[in-house]
Image: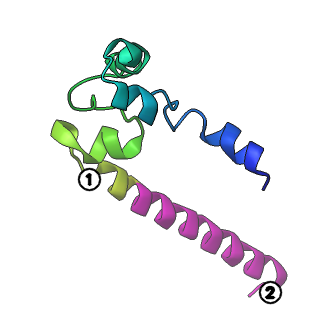
Amino acid sequence: MHPSLVRRQLGGLVPPKIATPSILSSGQGAGLSPLVNFYSKLPKGPAPSSAISGLKARYFNGKNASGKPLLATIFGIFLLGYTIDYQMHLKHHKNHPH
């Protein structure tokens, strides 16, 4: 991978280099205003809980916890297997009448 490509991909993750050693050693606080502005825009406090949707969040997590999806899956697999077995049974009797 080319260094410029890596730099472009990581550009959004790594903050810009605003605080250089010369600004920090000079003792001038005004030179750090871009850095303060950058970090003041970042969210503060704990990360908000994301609204995770899907079967796990809907049926297995929180106050809605239930085993219904598990039972429905077991019943569906049983029904599918029974249907396949029944169709094979019919094909067997179609070819071998007794």
Quarter the N terminus occupies = bottom right
Name which residue type carries label 1: Gly
Q: Amino acid at mark 2?
A: His
Vertical comparison of 71 with 33: above or below: below
Mark 1 Cα shell of 10 Å, populated few (<14), some (14-19), many (≥20): few
Q: Secondary structure at mark 1?
A: loop
The reply to whether callout 2 and callout 1 are in contact (CB within 8 Å) is no
Q: Is residue 87 above or below residue 73?
A: below
Give the quadrant of residue 62: top left
Q: Residue furthest right?
A: 95
Q: Earlier in the sequence, mark 2 or mark 1?
A: 1
Q: Is residue 17 magenta?
A: no
In the rendering, at what x and y percent does residue 22 appear? 44, 31
- The stretch drawn in magenta includes residue 82: yes
The residue pinned by badge 2 equals: 96
Q: In the structure shown, which secondary structural element does the residue marked by tag 2 occupy? A: loop
The residue positioned 41% from the left and 63% from the top of the image is 74
How crowded pointer 2 is (Cα within 10 Å; few <14, some 14-19, many 20+) is rated as few
Q: Which residues are magenta?
A: 73-98
Q: What residue is drawn where x is 60% and y is 41%?
A: 10
Point out residue 50 in the picture as x, y percentages from the top left corner.
34, 31
Residue 65 located left or right of residue 50: left
The residue identified by callout 1 is 67
